[in-house]
Image: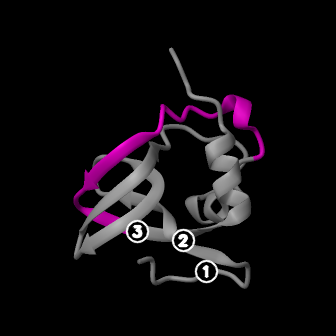
């Protein structure tokens, strides 16, 4: 589903970091996409991250300080609208994102 390849590292076409216009940033599997709208599964909101300077770096390397990140629980399904950016992730980044403990206030 994700069409943009940002580096020579192997990426996984359906697991992406997705930035929306006003809802924030999410990471998960894109199952369908139509213009600026996408349905995602196994998706987490990336509310705050530490140890990556940008979403591009986060999608390629993951986070360096997972204990400081604020990623709520994974949701089974989510529809996003007003998508601005879709970045495919490497396996290293996927493992890092999934490895961040669920943030609880």
In the image, taking residue 36 as reference, residue 15 lies left or right, namely: right
Farthest residue, direction right: 64
Q: Look at the numbered discs 1 and 2 and tell me whether their residues touch, using CB distance below 8 Å.
A: yes
Tell me the element at label 2: strand
Q: Residue at x 22, y 76 (%)?
A: 35
Mark nearest the camera among 3 and 2 is: 2
Q: Where residue 54 sits: x, y (%)?
A: 60, 58
41 on left or right of 23: right
What is the spatial separation of the Cα atoms under label 1 and label 3, in whole angstroms?
12 Å
Q: Nearer the viewer, mark 1 or mark 2?
A: 2
Q: Earlier in the sequence, mark 1 or mark 2?
A: 1
Q: Nearer the viewer, residue 75 or 20?
A: 75
The disc at residue 85 is 3
Q: Residue at x 40, y 58 (%)?
A: 19
Task: Give the residue pinned by disc 1.
Answer: 6
Residue 15 on image: x %, y %? 51, 64
Q: Magenta part of the protein: which range? A: 64-85
Residue highlighted by disc 2 = 88
Q: Residue at x 41, y 77 (%)?
A: 1
User: Which residue is more in the foreground, 10 or 23?
Assistant: 10
Q: CA distance from mark 3 to mark 2?
A: 10 Å
Whichever of callouts 1 and 3 sits on the residue coming sooner in the sequence is 1
Indicate the quadrant where residue 93 lies: bottom right
Q: From the viewer's perspective, is residue 51 above or below residue 16?
A: above
């Amino acid at each position: 589903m994700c069409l943009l390849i940002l580096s020579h590292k192997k990426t996984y076409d359906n697991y992406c970091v997705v930035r929306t216009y006003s809802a924030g940033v999410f990471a998960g599997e894109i199952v369908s996409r139509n213009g600026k709208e996408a349905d995602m599964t196994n998706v987490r909101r990336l509310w705050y991250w530490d140890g990556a300077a940008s979403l591009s770096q986060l999608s390629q390397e993951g986070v360096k300080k997972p204990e400081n990140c604020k990623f709520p629980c994974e949701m089974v399904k989510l529809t996003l609208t007003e998508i601005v950016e879709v970045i495919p992730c490497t396996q290293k980044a996927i493992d890092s994102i999934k490895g961040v403990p669920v943030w609880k206030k």
